[in-house]
Every structure is written in C-alpha cells, then in structure tokens.
Image: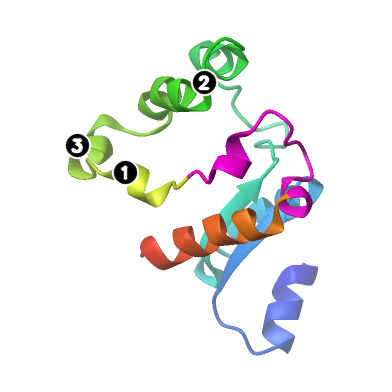
Amino acid sequence: MIQQGLLDALNITKADILDPSMGSFIAQELTLTNPDKVGKLILYVSLCGSNKSKPADPKVDQAFSDPSASPQEQLQKIIPLLFPTNWLKANPNYTNYMPLPKELVSSDTGHGLMYQYPDAFNRLILTFLENNDG
C-alpha cells in the first residue's frame, strides 16, 4: 500500500491522518490494514465506503436532513445517535472536543470547506488534535 510505504520511507512509525473526500477512502483502508500506524483518523466530507459498510440509521439521515433545524439543534439530535451512552455519560463536556466556529456552520459552506474557511477549519482540526488523546 502506497501510504504505508510512504510512512515507512519517511521513518514515521505513527501518524494522525486527515484525508478529505475520496482520499478518506484511502485513509480508512490505511487505518483498517495498519491500525498501529494511525493515531487519530479525521475524515472530512466522506462516506464509510466499500460494499462492507453499514448504512446509517434512518434517524441519522433525518437529523442531517432537517432544513428547519439550526446546526446546534442538528448536533443535539445527532450526537446521541453516533456515540454510545456510556461514552456520553463519561464525557459530559463532549462539546469541548467539537468547537464549531461560526464560519463552519454557515449555510454557504460545502465540499471545499477547508478552502473556503482555511483559518477556521485549521483551528478546528488543531483543537481536536490537541484535546483528544487516544
């Protein structure tokens, strides 16, 4: 696999991976085949790819598809569907891990969010990397 070969050639034993769009499929494959090489995996504008992926619960689709809900309301609907109850109880301040700069929740963002608002996007990613040990 090219990514593993690149990490080996650069003498990188473990890396945090951010890959957008189609690259996220490659990042997922790298993580599945070499979990010891990946620290944190950040997928952006992605799907869970492959014919082995499990479709999202219809409740998740409904929460993301509600145009009348604000981003904060959508988040409140989605979080309990995405994270185990035990984790939410153990991490009551989970929103500290997900800062949402105003620019990133505006209605004019899209697939190129990291290009539209690079400072806010980078701030969000760096905050995540700095505040999430694992």
From the viewer's perspective, tell me whether residue 24 is left or right of residue 2: left
| Residue 110 belongs to the span the image colors magenta | yes
**Magenta extent:** 100-116
> Which residue matches tag 2?
70
Q: Nearer the viewer, mark 3 or mark 1?
A: 1
| Amino acid under disc 2 | Ser
Residue sitting nearer the eye, 42 or 94: 94
From the viewer's perspective, tell me whether residue 128 is left or right of residue 85: right
Q: Earlier in the sequence, mark 3 or mark 1?
A: 3
- Vertical comparison of 112 with 72: above or below: below
| Residue 80 belongs to the span the image colors magenta | no
> Which residue matches tag 3?
89
Q: Secondary structure at mark 3?
A: helix
Q: Write the residue at 57% across / 22% down.
A: 56
- Vertical comparison of 64 with 14: above or below: above
Q: Write the residue at 62% across / 14% down.
A: 65
* For the residues bearing labels 2 and 3, Cβ distance under 8 angstroms: no
Q: Gap between marks 3 and 1, in whole Å?
A: 9 Å
Q: Secondary structure at mark 1?
A: helix
> Which residue matches tag 1?
94
Q: Gap between marks 1 and 2, in whole Å?
A: 19 Å
